[in-house]
Image (spheres, grey):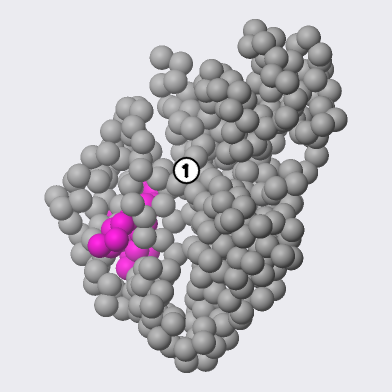
Amino acid sequence: MNPEKQWQMVLARDANSDGKFVYAVRSTGIFCRPTCPSRRPRRKLVEFFATAAQAERAGYRACKRCRPDGPNPQVTKIQAACRLIDENIDVTLTLSAIGNKVGLSPFYLQRLFKRLLGVTPQQYQHARRAGEFKSALMRGGRITDAIYEAGYSSSSRLYEKAQARLGMTPSAFRQKGAGAAIRFAILETQLGKLLVALTDKGICSIQFGERENDLERDLRKQFSQAEVSRDDAGLEQVTSKITDYLQGRRIPLDLPLDVQATAFQGRVWEALRQIPYGETRSYSQVAESIGDKKAVRAVARACATNPVCLVVPCHRVVQKNGSLAGYRWGKQRKAALLAAERKKISS
């Protein structure tokens, strides 16, 4: 993040910046959260760090007023709200009911939940319920049983939300895309073959591979009941953006997605899309950014199950010591992608 932008956030005590960086004051040797209520220092005395640990390594001490080295109390409350929802998946909880349990007003709960997780409490409840429903379907149970197992009061309540949550109707999802139309193209890139597949809602798969036949076979297996067709010309507007990106043009791949995700996977994948071009984050930093410091292994699993490489840039996640760790499409590709981004940044 640009230091001047960070400074403006500090001056404004911008709540959206809390947890994204800390600022340190050279004259006092103390570092703070951007939202610290203390008096603002002069700009020339301030430097910024991505984490509290980095500030401490530089010799600064944590402010005793805002406690930037401890748990964020806002994050702690939202974690408690998520646990409450998870434990009562079969009940529709109101903002007031959740707020009373975690000690927040309904208005502030809604605002804080949205800021930290990117969704409202109601949207989170819908996503968790849809996740339970999808799991029940994949276990092979009847749709009617799955509806009530996931906490829906009736089939009509489910079908009101199903297409938005699953991307397909419930029966189509269970039947591996029955009734859905999927078009795909295969590109020749410097990193090997690349398959790009779309539904009418957005991209559902981007995969590297060695052979076109293998990529097409895997796609058809994943969506064995869908209508799958190759359409290189029809997908050119999308594939040209990906080609430009791979050739070193620094463009945002803000393409629409139509992927199946649990609420947790969705939070991780959205966090990955926020990592700036040319930068990396550790698994623990990603876990911290979604408000769950202990979920490092779960973050790694979410990265490993990412179905749309590049658009969800899981190649930008590395181990804490900077080593590359694993990559679903091979470490060599991961190294090449990061090297190309860094070269573009430095040029």
Residue 92 image offset from top left, x and y in percent: 58, 76
What residue appears at the point 75 percent right and 46 percent down from the top-left corner?
73
Quarter of the image where the C terminus is located: top left
| Nearest to the observer: residue 135 or residue 66 | 66
What residue appears at the point 26 percent right and 50 percent down from the top-left corner?
186
Residue 177 image offset from top left, x and y in percent: 34, 74
What residue appears at the point 41 percent right and 21 percent down from the top-left corner?
344
- Quadrant assignment, res 166: bottom left
| Nearest to the observer: residue 258 or residue 125 | 125
Image: magenta residue range? 198-220
Residue 162 image offset from top left, x and y in percent: 40, 75
Q: Is residue 31 above or below residue 332?
A: above
Locate residue 185 relative to residue 274 in the image: left or right.
left
> Callout 1: helix, strand or loop?
helix
Residue 272 in sight here: yes
Residue 163 image offset from top left, x and y in percent: 36, 72
Assess whether residue 201 is covered by the magenta stretch.
yes
What residue appears at the point 62 percent right and 52 percent down from the top-left corner?
108
- Quadrant assignment, res 258: bottom left
Q: Is residue 69 above or below residue 90?
A: above
Assess whether residue 301 is covered by the magenta stretch.
no
- Quadrant assignment, res 343: top left
| Nearest to the observer: residue 322 or residue 270 | 270
Q: Residue furthest left?
A: 233
Q: Is residue 182 above or below residue 328?
A: below
Instruction: Bin the neighbour count of mark 1 within 10 Å (Cα to Cα): few under 14, some 14-19, many 20 and up.
Output: some
Q: Amino acid at mark 1?
A: Arg
The residue to which callout 1 is attached is 273
Residue 322 in sight here: no
Locate residue 119 relative to residue 239 in the image: left or right.
right
